[in-house]
């Protein structure tokens, strides 16, 4: 069970306000995801709403393999395990150093 702190709930609510006003495809990255409560809450809320946004990408990054195991279990419990990409590493390094996520120059 995920029981977020009030500050976490407020952060999710504010993020949802920002995202719902943006009709563009959106990438959400949770650095230091821990149990995954933030990215899971965002994924559940955004995927359950019809907001006119074509695409969301959800990434959860943590340096701890144990934390990622917990986040994976929680994502599965909440039905968003196929929507969130879990990456092991420090800060943005798993995204920066992964050729799948490099945007080519125009």
Image (spheres, rainbow, N blue to C red):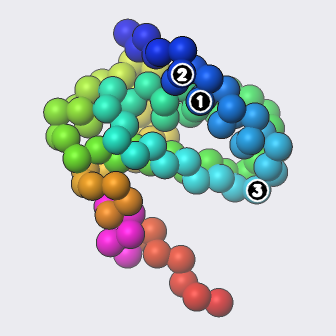
Q: How crowded is mark 3: few (under 14 residues within 10 Å), some or many (20 or more)?
A: few
| In the rendered image, the vertical position of residue 72 relative to residue 92, given as above or below | above
| In the rendered image, the vertical position of residue 6 relative to residue 10, given as above or below | above
Mark 1 residue element: helix
Mark 1 against mark 3, which lies toward the viewer?
1
Locate residue 72 relative to residue 79 in the image: left or right: left
Q: Where is residue 60 in the image (x, y as percent from the top left)?
A: 40, 44
To which residue does mark 2 refer?
Answer: 7
> Image point 31% across, 50% down: which residue?
87
Q: Quadrant of residue 14?
A: top right
Residue 72 visible in the displayed image:
no
**Foreground: 36 or 6?**
6
Q: How far apart, in angstroms, are the residues tagged by discs 1 and 2?
A: 6 Å
> Image point 35% across, 47% down: which residue?
61
Q: Where is residue 101 in the image (x, y as percent from the top left)?
A: 45, 68
Residue stretch in magenta: 94-99
Q: Which of marks 1 and 3 is nearer the N terminus?
A: 1
Q: Quadrant of residue 44?
A: top right
Quarter of the image for the N terminus: give it: top left
Whether tag 1 and tag 2 are in contact, CB under 8 A, the answer is yes
Q: Earlier in the sequence, mark 3 or mark 2?
A: 2
Mark 3 against mark 2, which lies toward the viewer?
2
Q: How crowded is mark 1: few (under 14 residues within 10 Å), some or many (20 or more)?
A: few
To which residue does mark 3 refer?
Answer: 24
């Amino acid at each position: 069970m995920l029981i977020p702190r009030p500050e976490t709930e407020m952060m999710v609510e504010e993020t949802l306000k920002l995202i719902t006003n943006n009709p563009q495809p959106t990438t959400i990255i949770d650095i230091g995801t821990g149990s995954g409560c933030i990215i899971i809450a965002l994924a559940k809320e955004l995927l359950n709403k019809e907001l006119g946004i074509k695409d969301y990408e959800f990434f959860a990054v943590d340096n701890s393999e144990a934390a990622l195991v917990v986040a994976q279990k929680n994502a599965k419990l909440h039905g968003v395990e196929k929507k969130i990409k879990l990456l092991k590493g420090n800060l943005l390094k798993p995204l920066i150093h992964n050729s799948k996520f490099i945007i080519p120059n125009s």
